[in-house]
Image (tube, grey):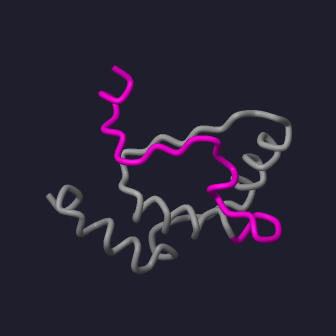
Amino acid sequence: YTHVEGELKAEIIRDPAKFVEVDPQNALALLDQKRAGKKLLLITNSDYVYTQRIMEYAYDPYLPGDMTWRDLFDVTVVSSAKPNFFA
C-alpha cells in the first residue's frame, strides 16, 4: 500500500542517502559504454520526478564537468508500466 500511494518514494526522495547505496563505478561504467559508441536506454516504472532525483543523486556527482545522467542515455522512458511496455 505504501509503495502504491507514493509515500515510500516521497520518503526516499527526501533523503536518498538513507536508502540508496551509491557506487561511483556505475556512472563511470555507463560513461565508458557511451564513449565507446554504445546506445544506452533507461526504462523504468518510476515517474519522472522520482527517477530524476534518484539518478541525480546516484550518478551526477561522478560524471565529468557539467554532464548529467541524462547525457548518458539516448532514450529514457519513465512510467513505462513494465512488463506491458514490452507487449
Q: Residue at x 73, y 46 (%)?
A: 30
Residue 60 left/right relative to 10: right
Placement of 7 over or under 87, stated as above or below? below
Residue 2 left/right relative to 14: left
Placement of 51 over or under 79, stated as above or below? below
Q: Position of residue 45 (x, y in %)?
A: 36, 45
Q: Residue at x 76, y 64 (%)?
A: 63
Q: Position of residue 77 (x, y in %)?
A: 46, 43
| Quarter of the image with the N terminus in it | bottom left
Residue 66 left/right relative to 13: right
Q: Residue at x 72, y 61 (%)?
A: 24
State the image quarter where residue 28 is shown: bottom right
Which region shows up in magenta?
61-87
Q: Position of residue 41 (x, y in %)?
A: 59, 38
User: Which residue is situated farthest in the bottom direction here?
Assistant: 14
| Quarter of the image with the C terminus in it | top left
Residue 55 left/right relative to 64: left
User: Which residue is situated farthest in the top direction here?
Assistant: 87
